[in-house]
Image (tube, grey):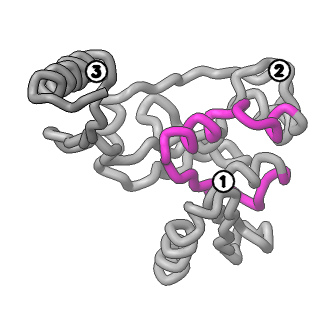
């Protein structure tokens, strides 16, 4: 084939048409950036959950705490609690079919009336699992501890190692179930240990 000015122009015009049309057929490579305009909402505050019938008498204004001899015991001095009670949700009467610790607490934290410790140890079964899904830390404040599967759900546990009413020996333990929560739990435990009664 002999190259002439006409052949070169024809060839060049066909290439331009081809490139022009291929621009519509093939998608160009582009880069996208995600920019958040508004700040991300994060929880600011705490969820206080009293999972014990006896403990609620010390805090709830509707109840009166009594000692074993029938005498009235003073309420906790927490002036901000009334503000919390007035502006938040409370469930005053949740009953468990069994009153011993394992069965009673299992029912209260799972909402399942036949729950025992084996129900609590499963993933996603307790209110603590829901709290962890939303990046809350959970703190268990207990008399002498609790059964292991409930303790495993807590990030920090405060309990009396001596089980003494007159001379309690308060212990703070961390339970690191998730590696990301480790530093936060240890920092909180250290702060609590410094301010222990």
- Residue 182 among those drawn in magenta: no
Determine whether 45 is above or below 160 in the image.
Answer: above
Depth check: 33 or 41 in front?
33
The residue at 60%/44% (across/down) is: 55
- Residue 131 among those drawn in magenta: yes
Please identify the quarter of the rendering in which residue 106 is found: top right
- Is label 2 in a helix, a strand or a loop? loop
Q: Earlier in the sequence, mark 1 or mark 2?
A: 2
Residue 97: assigned label: 2
Depth check: 181 or 70 in front?
181
Determine whether 195 is above or below 24 in the image.
Answer: below
Q: Earlier in the sequence, mark 3 or mark 1?
A: 3
The residue that disc 3 covers is 22
Q: Which residues are magenta?
A: 119-148
The residue that disc 1 covers is 154
- Is label 3 in a helix, a strand or a loop? helix
Horizontal side, residue 109 vs residue 130: left or right: right
Q: Are marks 3 and 2 in contact (CB under 8 Å)?
A: no
Residue 71 in the image: state x and y as whole percent. Answer: 61, 46
Residue 73 in the image: state x and y as whole percent. Answer: 55, 50
Which of discs 3 and 2 lies nearer the camera? The answer is: 3
The residue at 73%/47% (across/down) is: 68
Residue lying at the far bottom of the rendered structure: 194
Determine whether 141 is above or below 20 in the image.
Answer: below
Residue 192 in the image: state x and y as whole percent. Answer: 51, 73
Q: CA distance from mark 3 to mark 2?
A: 74 Å
Depth check: 121 or 11 in front?
11
Please identify the quarter of the rendering in which residue 129 is found: top right
The residue at 68%/70% (across/down) is: 173
Specify whether residue 181 is in view.
yes
Please identify the quarter of the rendering in which residue 72 is found: top right
């Amino acid at each position: 084939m002999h190259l002439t000015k006409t052949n070169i122009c024809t060839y060049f015009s066909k290439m331009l048409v081809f490139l022009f049309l291929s621009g519509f057929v093939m998608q160009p490579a582009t880069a996208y950036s995600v920019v958040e305009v508004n700040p991300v909402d994060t929880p600011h505050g705490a969820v206080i959950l009293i999972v014990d019938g006896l403990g609620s008498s010390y805090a709830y204004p509707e109840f009166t705490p009594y000692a074993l001899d029938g005498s009235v015991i003073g309420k906790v001095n927490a002036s901000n609690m009334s503000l919390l009670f007035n502006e938040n949700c409370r469930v005053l009467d949740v009953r468990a079919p069994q009153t011993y610790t394992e069965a009673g607490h299992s029912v209260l934290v799972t909402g399942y009336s036949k729950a025992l410790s084996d129900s609590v140890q499963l993933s996603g079964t307790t209110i603590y699992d829901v709290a962890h899904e939303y990046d809350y830390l959970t703190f268990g404040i207990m008399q002498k501890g609790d059964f292991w599967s409930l303790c495993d759900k807590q990030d920090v546990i405060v309990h009396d190692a001596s089980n003494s009413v007159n001379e309690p020996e308060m212990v703070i333990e961390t339970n690191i179930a998730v590696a990301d929560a480790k530093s936060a739990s240890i920092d909180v435990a250290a702060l609590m240990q410094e301010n222990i009664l």
